[in-house]
Amino acid sequence: MKKKMEGITRRSLFKVGAGLAAAGGLAAPRSASAGPKEGRLATLIDLNLCDGCPDRAVPACVTSCKAARNAQVQKPVDPIPVPFPVGKKGIEDWSKKQDVHDRLTPYNRIFVQKAEVEVGGTRRTLSIPRRCMHCDNPACATICPFAANHKYESGAVVINPDLCFGGAKCRTVCPWEIPQRQSGVGIYLHILPTLAGNGVMFKCDLCIDRIGSGGLPACVEACPRQALLIGPREKIFALAEERAQKTGGFLYGKSENGGTSTLYVSPVSFDVLDQAVAKGKGKPGFGPAKRRMEDTDGLGRAVLVSPVVGAAAGVAGAMGYLAKRKERVKREEEGNG
Amino acid sequence: MADRILAEQGRVVRHGIVELLEHWTIALSGLLLLLSGMFEMPLAGRYSIDKVPGLAWSSDFITSLSVHYVASVVFVAAALFHVVYHGMRGDFDLLPRKGDLASSWQVILSFFGKGEEPPFHKYLPEQRLAYLGMAFIIGGLIVSGLVKTYKNLYAPDMSLTVLLWATWAHNVFFMLFILAFLAHIGAILLKPNRPMFRGILTGKVRLDYARHRHPLWIDDLEPPRPAAPGPVAEAPLAEATPAPERSPLPEVPPEPLPPSAQESGSGEGGPEGSAVPKSDPGETRQKS
């Protein structure tokens, strides 16, 4: 398997890009042939193409993701420490439910949602692969108190399982509550397991190791209909716009949460999809997803200028003092003279 | 510096209004930073701190970040003001001097009844050392905090190495800041240091206390009194001079001296008005 992964080359990306382009009646993004590891990347998920793999028990993207990533999750300790003061209800243990594939879990970082909608007067069931959107300015990463979650230059937002304490702050600030916790694993076990931390958070990492070596994310590689595509950001964005325009479709992910690296193209509006999908824990919707950190940006800018303001006030105050002292000395000299 | 003797009140002005404002601005914004910084970790919800009246915001990470930013603006500006303002004025009383480490040890031993305290300048040697330590911690917090703020706003994909350094430095300095704060409070609770607490509240300390414990500082403030008796009026003490025999510190300030015997002074920036009017400006010595 590993060998196969390593064998994925830029050529295979080109193949996928070309295939997708052919399916969409579009020219292949030229830069796709340059390989995805250079520059910022983006992913396109075309809901006109995804059919949820009806011939399989589990969609191919889900199966391949499980196969590629689940080894990252260590076996939890037994018994899992009970978090104080929350109690047993605070434990999130998916280790015995690794087969769950209808929602996000630490062992299921992509799943396919279903939505019954009307498209052009016809009832249709849309299949919607859901996973981390890899936001442009992801609160989940910037607000992590341990820098365990980081956005890389490629655009991939990646949690380091060796640094994560599983406090789930990233899930709280994510508009889609994507990261999922596995209790009983991770660094917190070695510090204060019942008092601080509660496991490790897991989510899609865009298969960063694979794209780093010129390969493709497992889900993209496995998709039999090439409904998922990854490539240079500008090209993918242009392609998504073009497709939406051509089909009279809709885009999601371009401006949500301040912009993301994942664009959905849908034949129906995302308001409709938001109503149509089953939402709940591990099952995100398609809401407007305002970037909440935006509310703090003004104050953040004030923080950045505060050293200058403080120093300027210091200079002004000291100059005033020195001028007064000079005047006093002068007066004293005049008095003495 | 607004240091001057208010003989009629039996007080010495130890801190001017600017210094008091700096201290309390940094202290209060620092405490708010500690609190909101702790709430940047997911503990307020877990430990139901958000159920405490007035702390409902504590489990909302965006709100606690806003509070952290507001406190940072005040804290960082005050810290930079402090460095630039006093640097330009040449106020270096709080910077450590040669021999402070040994003197500090001597002072600590004296707290346990071993030996005598040496005579002090305006600040104790451990205050000067603690100042340097606190400045280092605050400097580290500010630099790492600014890097993290810049990342939040403009560079979420900054170098992971830089970010890890900034984040963990911020966390380590945060813990050091808590320890330094506790040590600071602990120091002021020590009986011999308690008279200084009044100083940081009102700007003034008792004159008898200052004469007893900070004779080198008082020497700087008083004009030479060749005939006056007592240890303060003796030849100025050098840093290394052994502690003179000093009478126990009286608990109650002594009655003010008759005006004829007072050393009075006045200066700018005192927190509580001016000193006793003096007949001859030449008799007043201010440290400026």
Image: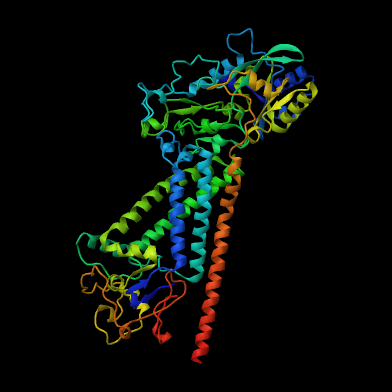
User: Left or right of A93: which side holds B225?
Assistant: left
User: Left or right of B127: which side holds A48?
Assistant: right
User: Which residue sits furthest front?
Assistant: B53
Q: Which residue is drawn at 31% across and 79% down?
A: B236
Foreground residue, A138 or B31? B31
User: Residue A103 at x, y = what percent?
Assistant: 55, 18
**Above or below for B78 versus B64:** below
Q: How many marks?
A: 0
On the rendered image, what quadrant is the N terminus of chain B found in?
bottom left
Instruction: Describe the colour scheme in one phrase.
Output: rainbow
Q: In which quarter of the image is residue A77?
A: top left
**Above or below for B230 versus A63:** below
On the rendered image, what quadrant is the C terminus of chain B found in?
bottom left
User: Is any part of residue A253 visible from this angle?
Assistant: yes
Q: In which quarter of the image is residue B260?
A: bottom left
**Above or below for A313 versus A138:** below
User: Residue A278 at x, y = what percent?
Assistant: 59, 18
User: Is any part of residue A45 visible from this angle?
Assistant: no
Q: Which residue is drawn at 40% across and 87% down?
A: B279
Foreground residue, A113 or B106? A113
User: Residue B113 at x, y = what percent?
Assistant: 19, 62
Foreground residue, A213 or A317? A317
User: Residue A277 at x, y = what percent?
Assistant: 62, 18
User: Which residue sits furthest bottom?
Assistant: A337
Q: Which residue is drawn at 54% across and 36% down?
A: A141
